[in-house]
Image (cartoon, rainbow, N blue to C red):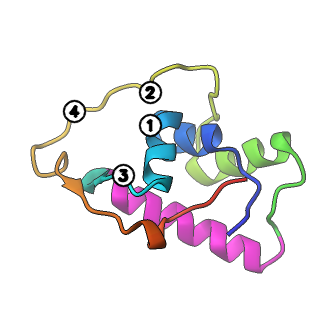
Amino acid sequence: MNANIPAAYIASALGVTRMTVFSWFRGGKMRTKILRKVEVLTDLIESDTAKGRLPAKNRAEAKAYLAEMVGHPIDTKAEEPKSEVSTPEESKPTEVNSSETPMQVA
């Protein structure tokens, strides 16, 4: 899918680093806790793409879209996201098939 949303914005929306998002694109492991967030965000983006709301026309539109979806401002200046305390089960990496990468961001 091409929603024209920069990887840095996706990272901010999900509370991970941009490098983590690029790792997922290359087939890297995804933690169980974040997997559900990625699935929900992917479903929303796919739905809005089908409805014609996406792709975003510019970066400002992409940032506003994601801020509305996640309910907080998209901070692309932060180097590292705020860490959250998680249980050992939530921290387990989950295999992600690279052919089924959840999002492709232009």
Mark 2, Cα crowd under 10 Å, few <14 / some 14-19 / many 20+, is some
Mark 4 and mark 2: Cα distance apart in space: 13 Å
Q: Secondary structure beneath disc 4? A: loop
Work out whether mark 1 precedes mark 2 in sequence or the reverse, and give the earlier one: 1
Label 1–label 2 contact, CB within 8 A: yes
Q: Secondary structure beneath disc 1? A: loop
Q: Which residue is mark 2?
A: 81
Q: Residue furthest bottom?
A: 50
Q: Which residue is mark 3?
A: 28
Q: Is residue 2 magenta?
A: no
Label 4–label 2 contact, CB within 8 A: no
Mark 1, Cα crowd under 10 Å, few <14 / some 14-19 / many 20+, is some
In the image, what residue type sits under mark 1? Val
Task: Work out whether 70 lies above or below 82.
Answer: below
Q: Which residue is mark 4?
A: 85
Give the x, y percent position of residue 7. 62, 44
Q: Is residue 97 left or right of residue 40?
A: left
Main secondary structure along the magenta-highlighted residues: helix
Mark 4 and mark 1: Cα distance apart in space: 14 Å
Give the x, y percent position of residue 102. 50, 65
Q: Quadrant of residue 67?
A: top right
Label 1–label 3 contact, CB within 8 A: no
Work out whether mark 4 precedes mark 3 in sequence or the reverse, and give the earlier one: 3
Quarter the N terminus occupies:
bottom right
Q: Which residue is mark 1?
A: 16
Work out whether mark 4 precedes mark 1 in sequence or the reverse, and give the earlier one: 1
In the image, what residue type sits under mark 2? Pro
Work out whether mark 1 precedes mark 3 in sequence or the reverse, and give the earlier one: 1
In front: 86, or 1?
A: 1
In front: 38, or 69?
A: 38
Name which residue lies at 44% across and 46% down. Answer: 23
Q: Secondary structure beneath disc 2? A: loop
